[in-house]
Amino acid sequence: MTVARSDKTILRALAGETLPVPPIWMMRQAGRYLPEYRATRAQAGDFLSLCYNSELAAEVTLQPIRRFGFDAAILFADILLLPQALGAELWFETGEGPRLSTITGAEGLRALKGRDDIHDHLAPIYETVRILSRELPGETTLIGFAGAPWTVATYMIAGRGTRDQGPAHALKAADRATFAALIDLLTDATVEYLSMQVAAGAEVVKLFDSWAGSLKGADFTEFAVEPTRRIIAALKDRHPGLPVIAFPREAGEGYIGFARATGADCVALDNSVSADWAAANVQVDGCVQGNLAPQHMVTGGQALVDEAQRIVRTFRGGPHIFNLGHGITPDADPENVAAMIAAVRSA
Ligand code: CP3
């Protein structure tokens, strides 16, 4: 039986509906905590080969849907594929994380491709989306995604993940014009990338701004709020009614008014803010998602049940999608995921 778009619980919550039981999905729900993911990844070779193998990327996206019946599937890919499509070199050091060629000034920026030159490189990602929109159960919503410009820029400038995003802050201070031009290029390219995901079948898109919390004051407005607002406005212009989730991780006070300022339909909450605070200050503007500390997926037990149910009850007065405050970690126990879902559905 086909389920009408309007019957999908995630789409209803994103449209502002308060539901008796929140729909559920999890950041990094396809990942190393699942033995079936590890097996498919081994078959693909390495992580990037898995991302660019449309059949296998679709397979790992479907694995947590089959196992847990989540209400949404998120495309299996990575936020760093867009810089790679723009011409940056990208590889993953085992046990350490991503490495990229670095952008240290105007010359590095000039060497990148234009916003419209990314699609040949990203064609396998669009194919993964097409496979998923065919193969997902009718009630499951397909979420596409990209990194937000600031977060992607922090990796492109440093060439790796950093604790304090020091190199990006340094370039912003030393050569603001080059820094701002990089943010502009990423903003435009992200619109093109997400627009193609939507054309291929993504029903919702999410912007991951994992390092939004290190932008303060006017910088937060200029480099987190404004690029997000521009991306959302352009996408909604091309795809009227497209729901967008924004994740300005660790934005703190920056969460207040973020949905209004950017046009996001849902704001994803990390686990550093309290649910009570977020219900009063963020959910007043629309749907919220997230907040459960990923560590509970490792430790489980009654604390997991109590905390999951407390979050459900705290957000019960408005639109809410249940999720973690950040990605599930490789040491998590799949049994705890099942326990979390049961706790949420019986809260
Ligand atoms: O959520 C999902 O399941 C969808 C797929 C997805 C991945 N990465 C797969 C992945 C998404 C949405 C991302 C986003 C992403 N990637 C972010 C933003 C969200 C966040 O976590 O803050 C960032 C910063 C990246 C960059 C990145 N990719 C890093 C820093 C790492 C290494 C850290 C790690 O967990 O190993 C990755 C690798 C990565 N991306 C993995 C997965 C499943 C692990 C790769 C593996 O199998 O070894």
Image (cartoon, rainbow, N blue to C red):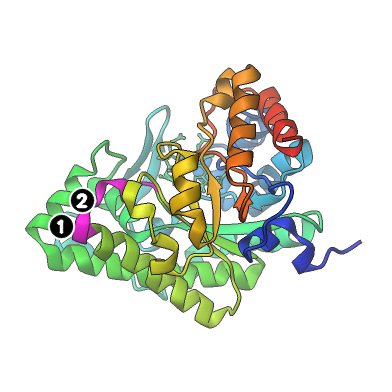
Residue 74: x %, y % from top left: 61, 51
- Label 2 close to label 1 by CB (< 8 Å): yes
The residue pinned by badge 2 equals 168
Instruction: State the quadrant of the N terminus.
Output: bottom right
Farthest residue, direction left: 174
Tell me the magenta residue range: 210-219
Give the amino acid at mark 2. Answer: Ala
Q: Quadrant of residue 314?
A: top right
Give the dominant element type of the magenta stretch: helix, strand or loop: helix
The reply to whether residue 251 is visible in this rendering is no
Mark 2 secondary-structure assignment: helix
Mark 1 secondary-structure assignment: helix
Residue 48: say if magenta: no
Residue 319: x %, y % from top left: 62, 56
Give the amino acid at mark 1. Answer: Lys
Front-most of residues 156 and 94? 156
Residue occupying image coordinates x 31% and y 46%: 213
Is ligand 1 less than 8 Å from the beta carbon at label 2?
no
The residue pinned by badge 1 equals 172
Label drawn at residue 292: none
Residue occupying image coordinates x 61% and y 36%: 41
Q: Is residue 217 left or right of residue 145?
A: left
Please, is residue 43 above or below residue 180 in the view? Answer: above
Residue 213: say if magenta: yes
Front-most of residues 346 and 192? 346
Farthest residue, direction right: 1
Please, is residue 325 above or below residue 305 in the view? Answer: below
Q: Quadrant of residue 234?
A: bottom left
